[in-house]
Image (cartoon, rainbow, N blue to C red):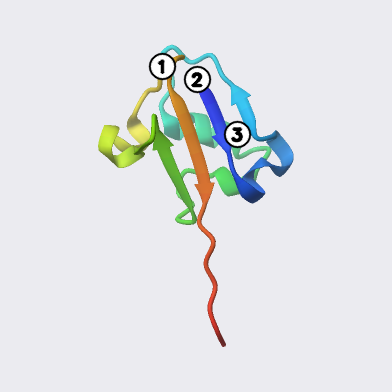
Amino acid sequence: MKLVLYGSLSRKLGKELNIEVNGQKSLKEILEELSTKEPDLKPDNPNILVFVNDAEASLVGGLAYRPKNEDKVLVLPVAHGGRD
């Protein structure tokens, strides 16, 4: 699987990672493992969006989805702000 990280998420791990998965791990498990190096990748982080093959992850089963090696997974940080 190709994992593409955007913005601040790519600082410690790089922009792209190729991970052999063959449907053996869920997105949640993969993100939990990666969060040991980049804490913002924790699966319960409400400030990230996950896409699988250009579709929001909830459309393919959410974080329970088990990606295949040919899948492309994008993780985007949600940027928000406002005025005081």
Which residue reaches farthest front? 54
Of mark 3 and mark 2, the one earlier in the sequence is 2
Where does label 1 land, which residue?
A: 68
Q: Kindly indicate whether the residue at mark 1 contacts the one at mark 2 (C-beta within 8 angstroms).
A: yes
> With respect to residue 83, does 51 lie above or below?
above
Residue 37 falls left or right of residue 28: right
Mark 3 vs mark 2: give the one in front: 2
Residue 38 falls left or right of residue 49: right
Q: Regarding mark 1 in the picture, which secondary structure is present there? A: loop
Residue type at tag 2:
Met
Residue type at tag 1:
Lys
> With respect to residue 83, does 39 lie above or below?
above
What is the quadrant of residue 58 in the picture? top left
Total marks in image: 3
Q: Position of residue 50 (x, y in %)?
A: 43, 41
Disc number for residue 34: 3
